[in-house]
């Protein structure tokens, strides 16, 4: 089944404890992206990647890192999480960023930072 | 930058028709998407417009006017399961889609 898989789905952590949210897609998509969703603010892009070893900042990149060493994986790294990073995170992918290529989203990762 | 506006919340009656508007201001334009998102779930694709006019897909239709920076999503024969958030996303000159804040649609009997 074609899908985007995120892990963990739920996580409660403490301020300053490094964590990684993994994202993997099995559709050979070139484009991958991370979003956070907060009440009243909608989906805001954190980082995106056009292809392997190509990453770029979105609208809210502060406090996050990403890497794209393989086409299928795009992990989101929080080096020193803070309470303002408590949010619902979505990973998404598509064939490319152009044309009618729609985004396929993962199921979401709900992160709470205490 | 990009600015995308949608109403925050709308209510409608089962069986009725509802129109959700989206206005945008972008540097360049390379397509507009509508996604549906049920509470606690991932967004799923509904429609894509890149040229002016109406795209119809079953009970859902989407309209685009590039000169006015305007789109709407039309939902006909509303069902209770249509209660969800509807997200407008615009792809500007950078080809990276930007999402509006979403419209929460409540369908009541």
Image: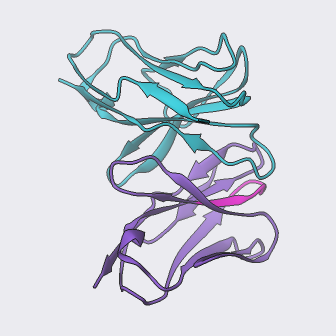
Is residue A91 left or right of A25 when viewed as pictured? Answer: left
* Residue displayed at 65% across by 56% down: B90
> What colour is chain A?
cyan
**The residue stretch that appears in magenta:** B26-34
Is residue A79 left or right of A98 when viewed as pictured? Answer: left
Image quadrant where residue A74 sits: top right
Q: Residue A82's spot in the image, x, y percent?
A: 28, 22
* Residue displayed at 75% across by 43% down: B94
- Above or below, B41 against B103 in this view is above
- Above or below, A100 against A93 in this view is below
Is residue A109 left or right of B70 when viewed as pictured? Answer: left
Q: Residue A16's spot in the image, x, y percent?
A: 27, 11
Q: How is the image coloured?
A: by chain
- Above or below, B22 against A81 in this view is below
Image quadrant where residue A50 sits: top right
The chain whose colour is purple is B
- Above or below, B11 against A30 in this view is below
Query: Residue B42 versus residue A39: which sits nearer the camera?
Result: B42
């Amino acid at each position: 089944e074609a899908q985007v898989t995120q892990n963990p789905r739920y996580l409660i952590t403490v301020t300053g404890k490094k964590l990684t949210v993994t994202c993997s897609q099995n559709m050979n998509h070139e484009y991958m992206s991370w979003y956070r969703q907060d009440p009243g603010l909608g989906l805001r892009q954190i980082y995106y990647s056009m292809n392997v070893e190509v990453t770029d900042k979105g609208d809210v990149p502060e406090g996050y890192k990403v890497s794209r060493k393989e086409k299928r994986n795009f992990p989101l790294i929080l080096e020193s999480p803070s309470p303002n990073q408590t949010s619902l995170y979505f990973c998404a992918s598509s064939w490319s960023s152009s044309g009618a290529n729609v985004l396929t989203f993962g199921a979401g990762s709900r992160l709470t930072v205490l | 930058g990009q600015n995308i506006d949608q109403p925050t919340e709308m209510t409608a009656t089962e069986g009725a028709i509802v129109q959700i508007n989206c206005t945008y201001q972008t540097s360049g334009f390379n397509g507009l998407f509508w996604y549906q998102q049920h509470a606690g779930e991932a967004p799923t694709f509904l429609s894509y417009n890149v040229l002016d006019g109406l795209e119809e897909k079953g009970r859902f239709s989407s309209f685009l006017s590039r000169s006015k920076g305007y789109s709407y999503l039309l939902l006909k024969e509303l069902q209770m399961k249509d209660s969800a958030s509807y997200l407008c996303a615009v792809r500007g000159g950078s080809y990276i889609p930007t999402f509006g804040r979403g419209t929460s649609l409540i369908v009541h009997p």
